[in-house]
Image: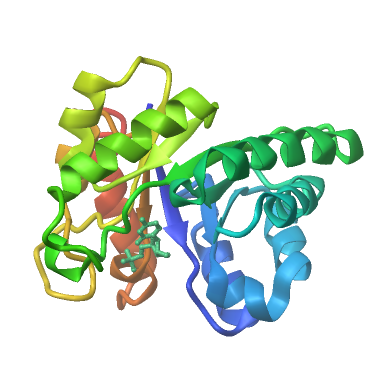
């Protein structure tokens, strides 16, 4: 069953906690990203966890293997449920991340899912530093295939690439898709899709930020997303 994850991209902890409390009966997963984590780090992570949410720590680690090993170990020790690393970091970095998770589990029994980021959903081919090179979907497929071989639990991609990845990769990977929109309003997300379509194509986790966090009524907005994600079970 697909899960909606609300991205708490706030610069104030009070905003994040207040929205989390409002969404208590609407979603199980929250995302903590760079903005919130850089200011409040482990403190806000623990507070949101204490409210009963599953936490997706989306810091998209990309560094030398030894540094990423340490970062993933620290994140795992915090008790979070899922985290991201950039597949562009290469095999040694990904394997170091998985080793870091193992070490972190020694400090905290919890085993977070490690997901590999392919190409950000805010990018189109012309935004890449090498636009003259391959189609974005080919680059995504290549990275995802390598990530699967290196041992990640899942990949982050645009829902527009799901059909291709599902056809070409071995089963068993989780697919997390940001850039999910109920309408096609223009913002910085370029490779977008509706929640219903993303679920049909096989997304396991759908990350939604501004369409919920900036909505006049975030609870109502979250319900609209959930209705498309779980049409049979929601009012
Ligand atoms: O506000 P919006 O719905 O665009 O938020 C999407 C969230 O998903 C943001 O928190 C962003 O950091 C995250 N994300 C993304 N593209 C990726 C990975 C994560 O947009 N490839």
> Quick check: can you spot residue 48?
yes
Name the residue rendered at 15%, 48% in the picture: 134
Callout count:
0
In what quadrant does ligand 1 lie? Answer: bottom left
Colour scheme shown: rainbow
Residue at screen point 34% across, 77% down: 214
In this image, 215 relative to 137: left or right?
right
Residue at the image position 58 percent from the left and 64 percent from the top: 21
Up the image or down, 234 lies above or below 135; here it is: above
Q: Quadrant of the N terminus?
A: top left
- Residue 96 horizontal/vertical position (percent): 68, 40
Outermost residue, right side: 107
89 relative to 182 in the view: left or right:
right
Q: Determine the image quadrant of residue 145.
A: top left
Q: Position of residue 7 (x, y in %)?
A: 45, 62
Name the outermost residue toward the top. 171
Asked whether residue 196 is in view, the answer is no
Horizontally, is 229 left or right of 18 in the view? left
83 in relation to 234, above or below: below
- Rendered view: 182 above or below 134: below
* Residue sitting at x 17%, y 30%: 164
The quadrant in which the C terminus is found is top left
Residue 224, position in %: x, y?
25, 53
Expressed as whole percent of the image width and height from the top left, the position of residue 119 reads 31, 53
- Judging depth in this view, the residue of 42 and 224 nearest the camera is 42
Q: Choose between 88 and 178: the one closer to the eye.
A: 88
């Amino acid at each position: 069953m697909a899960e909606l994850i609300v991205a708490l991209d706030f610069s104030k902890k009070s905003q994040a906690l207040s929205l989390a409390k409002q969404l208590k009966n609407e979603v199980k997963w929250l995302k903590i990203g760079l903005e919130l984590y850089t200011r409040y780090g482990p403190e806000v992570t623990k507070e949101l966890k204490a409210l009963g949410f599953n936490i997706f720590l989306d810091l998209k680690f990309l560094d030398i293997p030894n540094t990423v090993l340490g970062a993933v170990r620290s994140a795992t020790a915090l008790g979070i449920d899922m985290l991201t690393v950039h597949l562009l970091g290469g095999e040694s970095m990904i394997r170091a991340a998985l080793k870091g998770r193992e070490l972190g589990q020694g400090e905290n029994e919890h085993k977070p899912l490690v997901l590999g980021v392919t190409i950000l959903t805010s990018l189109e081919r012309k935004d890449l530093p090498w636009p003259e090179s391959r189609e974005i979907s080919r680059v995504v497929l290549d990275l995802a295939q390598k990530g699967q071989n290196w041992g990640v639990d899942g990949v982050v991609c645009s829902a527009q690439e799901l059909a291709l990845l599902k056809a070409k990769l071995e089963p068993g990977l989780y697919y997390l898709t940001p850039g999910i929109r109920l309408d096609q309003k223009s913002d910085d997300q370029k490779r977008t899709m509706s929640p219903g379509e993303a679920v049909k194509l096989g997304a396991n986790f759908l990350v939604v930020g501004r369409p919920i966090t900036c909505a006049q009524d975030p609870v109502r907005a979250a319900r609209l997303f959930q209705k498309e994600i779980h049409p049979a079970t929601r009012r």
